[in-house]
Amino acid sequence: MFGLTGKITNPIELPSVVLAYIGDAVYELAVREYLISRGLVNVNKLHQEAVRHVRASTQARIFHALDGHLTEAEQAVIRRGRNAKSGHNPRCNSIIEYRESTGFESLVGYLYLKQEWSRLEEIITLARQVIEEELK
């Protein structure tokens, strides 16, 4: 995978905000790919739609949609991410939505760094289902 020079042996030891940092990038790329696969090719429209789906309120809904679909280890990662202190306040979202979105991003980052591709794809697929509900 581009940019991944070697497997990080124990991503769980990384701070949750670091997991969220990488998870944010991985999730945004997945959203962009999804939107293009749906036929969006206008860059301005792509950007507007991507922003809509990667914002904290949408990720908070995904956080709740994952309930009952996670292993104990994944639950621990998402909970740790949700409880992490990032050092800044959200601009447009409630602190609860912001923290839940950080939990989701932490999980995505954790799975990415563990190189658990099939599980990451399952989580992204569940996230897409939330996005598809928004598109209706």
Image (cartoon, rainbow, N blue to C red):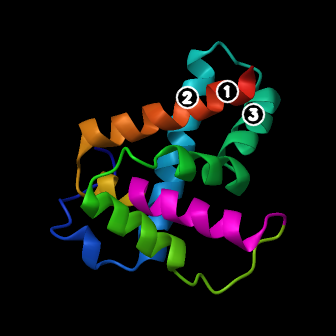
Question: Are there few (<14), some (14-19), or many (20+) residues within 10 Å of tag 3?
Answer: some
- Outermost residue toward the front in this view: 68
133 within the magenta span: no
> Given contact means CB atoms under 8 Å apart, are the residues at marks 2 and 1 in contact?
yes
Mark nearer the N terminus (2 vs 3): 3
Identify the residue at horizontal 61%, vertical 70% (top origin): 99
Instruction: Give the CA distance from mark 2 to mark 1.
Output: 6 Å
Asked if residue 9 is positioned above or below residue 84 in the image, the reply reads above
Identify the residue at horizontal 41%, vertical 67% (top origin): 19
Disc 2 marks a residue whose amino acid type is Gln
The secondary structure that dominates the magenta segment is helix
Instruction: Give the CA distance from mark 2 to mark 3.
Output: 15 Å
Q: Which residue is mark 2?
A: 129
Determine whether the residue tagged by mark 3 lies in a helix, strand or loop. helix
| Residue 46 x, y percent position in the rendering | 73, 30
Determine whether the residue tagged by mark 2 lies in a helix, strand or loop. helix
Determine whether the residue tagged by mark 1 lies in a helix, strand or loop. helix
Disc 1 marks a residue whose amino acid type is Glu
* Along the line of sight, the residue nearer the viewer: 71 or 106: 71
Q: Which residue is mark 1?
A: 133
The magenta-colored residue range is 92-108
**Residue 87 relative to residue 9: left or right:** right
Instruction: Give the CA distance from mark 1 to mark 3.
Output: 14 Å
| Residue 104 x, y percent position in the rendering | 50, 57
Asked if residue 29 is positioned above or below residue 15 in the image, the reply reads above
**Residue 7 relative to residue 86: left or right:** left
Classify the position of the C terminus by image quarter: top right
| Residue 102 x, y percent position in the rendering | 56, 65
Question: Are there few (<14), some (14-19), or many (20+) residues within 10 Å of tag 1?
Answer: few
| Residue 45 x, y percent position in the rendering | 80, 28
Classify the position of the N terminus by image quarter: top left
Q: Which residue is mark 3?
A: 49
